Amino acid sequence: MATDPADAVDVGDETDDATDYNGYVTTTEIAGDDDGPLAGKTIAVKDNISTEGVRTTCGSAMLADYVPPYDATVVERLKQAGATITGKTNMDEFGMGSTTETSAFGPTDNPAAPGHVPGGSSGGSAAVVAAGDADLALGTDTGGSVRNPAAFCGVVGIKPTYGLVSRYGLVAYANSLEQIGPIAPSVEEAAELLEVVAGPDPNDATTEDATDHGTDYDFAAAADGDVDGLSIGVPTELVEPADEAVTDSFWSAIDDLESQGASYHDVDLPSVEHAVEAYYVIAMSEASSNLARFDGVRYGYSSDSDGNWNEAFAETREEGFGKEVKRRVVLGTYALSAGYHDKYYKQAQDARAWVKQDFDESLSDADVLAAPTMPVPPMERGENLEDPMALYLADANTTPVNLADLPAISVPIEETSDGLPVGMQFVGPAFGEKAIIRAGSALA
């Protein structure tokens, strides 16, 4: 049998999660330096980001007892900035999900809309901020996993440009797509957290220095709310298919921005119609490779099989992984297999290049692009858990941004008539974090 997450060991001063919405996997207190820009702030960290001496489970029974021997770079930077880390937040297992319902530690409820999902896979991080149990949080965004829960929980989430924030110490899902990003009650607070964690890292060769791209790291200063003269492109492909309640809130926010001096025009992104398919082929392929390391030999859960190594390996993965993780590993392995690589993976990469080209062309005539973050309001818990295709399609507005390696921010806008949170997404050019922060600050 796989390790029961409820039996996972405590480490140091860890305690079980006491919140009724199940936002934390592990609560603890990791004190930072006495002084710094985040001194006095409490920050929750998604449970796929390594914390020395505090277990890091990735929401999986496979890693229920895993205690990293080192801190992720972003955690080191939080400590140096004076932040106090309050714990590790619940998440979809290995980041594979959009509702935080696939966690081996149970689903997370939405404090902003009880009985509804908080989004995912960083649902725990968004939930603890929405509930006021942490001032700020870090999540990870592979196909919208910071922006999705930010929208569903009525808070702010930033997906940085690929390479702006170090991924050293992040348990990888899909290396070429994911970024660590901040979640906060306001745009300015999210920008302040981004300032702390951003910047090149010798331990991550994919990081870049923003100053090499004509900008700096003074992100919070951009949250001035001044959108006078801002040009906003609105991709019709990301607006028209959305739920009516969502589009009503979106256009109301556009009206608000126009009243503050911004202007908008329609843009075409024909490639995004294929973005979800391309994203999932690429993400699942990379996941199948990354998760091959969980074999029951070096670390993590190991089955009690008395068979040969192949049998023990198979049983470990069968027992240690949940249904959604196994589904994605199998599909990713298939896409990379002999005879199918060119048919699926190569075509997905070609589609990715097309998506990036479309975004670059649209942003040449606009300062930012705007669309609903999610095409639907938060679903009721359990509503789509047995319909993975419906959940995959719900990522239609967020996955294209990861394929294009661009920055995006989700900010809360007018709720639906049922009181459900709605998010608006701004997308900027590469290393254009200041543009999206300025746009978002006019609303949140």
Image (tube, rainbow, N blue to C red):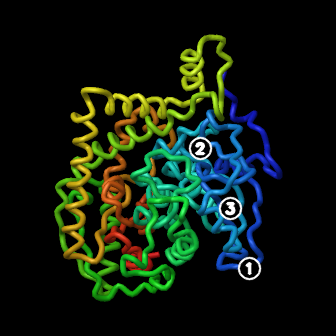
Quarter that holds the N terminus? top right
Q: Which label's residue is closer to the chain start, 3 or 1?
A: 1
Q: Nearer the viewer, residue 349 or 275?
A: 349
Residue tagged by mark 3?
133
- The vertical placement of 57 against 203, above or below, is above
Left or right of residue 214, residue 316 in this image: right
Residue at 65% from the left image edge and 79% from the top image edge: 37
**Residue 83: image location, x then y, percent:** 69, 70
**The disc labelled 1 sits on which kind of residue?**
Asp
Q: Nearer the viewer, residue 375 or 181?
A: 181
Q: Taking the image as drawn, is residue 421 in sight? A: no
Asked which secondary structure carries label 2, the reply is loop
Q: CA distance from mark 2 to mark 1?
A: 30 Å
**The disc labelled 3 sits on which kind of residue?**
Asp
Residue at 38% from the left image edge and 72% from the top image edge: 431
Name the disc covering residue 188, or none: none
For label 2, the crowd category at 10 Å Cα-Cα, with few meaning under 14, some 14 to 19 and many 20 or more, is: many
Name the disc covering residue 58, or none: 2
**Residue 427: image location, x then y, percent:** 34, 68
Q: Taking the image as drawn, is residue 329 in sight? A: yes
Q: Which label's residue is closer to the chain start, 2 or 3?
A: 2
Residue tagged by mark 1?
35
Dividing the picture into quadrants, the one containing residue 66 is top right
Q: Nearer the viewer, residue 370 or 384?
A: 370
Asked which secondary structure carries label 3, the reply is loop
Residue at 35% from the left image edge and 73% from the top image edge: 253
Asked if marks 2 and 3 touch (Cβ < 8 Å), the reply is no
**The disc labelled 2 sits on which kind of residue?**
Cys
Asked which secondary structure carries label 1, the reply is loop
Left or right of residue 313, residue 6 in this image: right
Q: CA distance from mark 2 to mark 3?
A: 20 Å
Q: Which mark lies nearer to you, 3 or 1?
A: 1
